[in-house]
Image (cartoon, grey):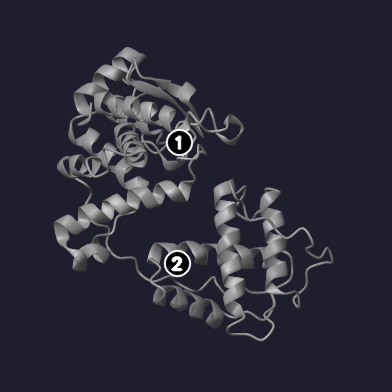
């Protein structure tokens, strides 16, 4: 996976207020990589996003300031950057994320004694549009039938959608799956989560059928590939045999969600109805389980949600968990 690392030839001299913005970003990237940050340790994917956002900001500053430095950026520059992103069609959520990166960056400069203020602290992102209504069970069924049924990518995408919804997986959990994690005879898989492994996650019969079909296509697509160029153990791969990247899967899910929304609301409603990638299916899984009468213990165990208290009556065995899942999940 490509990462954004500070340039290897970055200057080693101490950072000061006259240092170029790019030099300040490189110094902050080094601090993030070392696990040193005002808010504590930052996850690798968040580090990558921060460095990408800050590099974009540093590049933008050259359109406003002759020789931008870490010391001459003002709140007006930050506001102008947000307005620039809005004109480009960036979503308010995206702008809010980039603004969070700027606040953290200037907070780092304050902590280092380079600046006495944080020009991004008082800037507020644009108000996000109201979230679209959650997907109904009928909409999920329609969504799952959108991938092409006669191509490797279509069959693979159907299997990914089934797992995102059927097991309520996070995007990173889906991408981390290996062939060894599957238990198709038991209609489940093992998921490694940040708060510990989940020995068994049900996926239901439709998910199992979709996976079996994909595995056949996967074998046919990779049979003539040089094994040294293939991520042999990875479950979801490209036609070239490489483990999929997060943005690739997000684009796949977003494309099908747009097709679904256009079919229901027309092109003029697409922007206001736009849904938010893989998390939409995870949210639908949670909602539909609860609406079907699943108890909080099942939902918490399945989704790995720390915010949901697991009651004493939580499933005590794989068999009980599977039985309760099959009685509640629409795709069981």
- Callout 1 crowding tier (Cα within 10 Å): few <14, some 14–19, many ≥20: some
User: Who's the residue at 31% across and 47% down the image?
Assistant: 280
Residue 316 vertical position relative to residue 138 in the rendered view, above or below: above
Q: Quadrant of residue 296?
A: top left
Checking the image for residue 111, the label placed there is none
Residue 235: % across, % down: 45, 31
Query: CA separation, marks 1 and 2?
Result: 26 Å
Residue 191 sits above or below residue 138 on the image: above
Disc 2: which residue: 95
Vertical side of 149 occupied by 82: above or below: below
Of 166 and 238, nearer the camera is: 238
Spot occupied by residue 86 in the image (x, y as percentages of width and height): 41, 74
Q: Residues within 10 Å of mark 2 (few under 14, many from 20)?
A: many
Q: Quadrant of residue 325?
A: top left
Please give the residue where the numbered disc 1 appears in the rendered image.
Answer: 173
**Quadrant showing the C terminus:** top left
């Amino acid at each position: 996976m490509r990462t954004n690392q500070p340039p290897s030839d970055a200057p080693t001299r101490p950072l000061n207020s006259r240092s170029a913005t790019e030099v300040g970003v490189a110094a902050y990237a080094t601090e993030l990589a070392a696990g040193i940050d005002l808010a504590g340790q930052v996850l690798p994917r968040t580090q990558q996003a921060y460095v990408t956002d800050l590099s974009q900001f540093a590049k933008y500053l050259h359109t406003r300031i002759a020789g931008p430095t870490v010391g001459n950026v003002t709140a007006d520059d930050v506001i102008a950057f947000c307005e620039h992103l809005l004109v480009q069609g960036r979503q308010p959520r995206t702008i809010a994320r980039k603004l969070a990166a700027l606040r953290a960056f200037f907070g780092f400069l304050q902590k280092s004694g380079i600046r006495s203020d944080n020009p991004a602290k008082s800037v507020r992102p644009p108000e996000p549009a109201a979230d679209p209504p959650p997907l109904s069970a009928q909409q999920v069924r329609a969504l799952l039938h959108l991938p092409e049924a006669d191509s490797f990518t279509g069959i693979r995408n159907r299997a990914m959608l089934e797992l995102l919804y059927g097991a309520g997986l996070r995007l990173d959990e889906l991408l981390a799956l290996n062939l060894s994690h599957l238990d198709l005879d038991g209609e489940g898989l093992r998921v490694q989560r940040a708060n510990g492994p989940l020995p068994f996650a049900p996926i239901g019969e439709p998910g199992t059928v979709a996976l079996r079909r994909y595995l056949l296509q996967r074998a046919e697509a990779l049979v003539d590939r040089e094994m040294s160029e293939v991520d042999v153990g990875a479950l979801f791969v490209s036609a070239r045999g490489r483990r999929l990247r997060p943005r690739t899967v997000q684009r796949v899910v977003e494309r099908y969600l747009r097709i679904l929304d256009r079919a229901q609301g027309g092109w003029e409603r697409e922007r206001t109805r736009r849904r938010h990638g893989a998390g939409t299916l995870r949210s639908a899984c949670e909602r539909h389980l609860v609406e079907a009468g699943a108890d909080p213990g099942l939902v918490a165990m399945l989704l790995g949600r720390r915010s949901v208290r697991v009651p004493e009556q939580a499933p005590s065995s794989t068999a009980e968990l599977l039985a309760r899942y099959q009685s509640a999940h629409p795709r069981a």
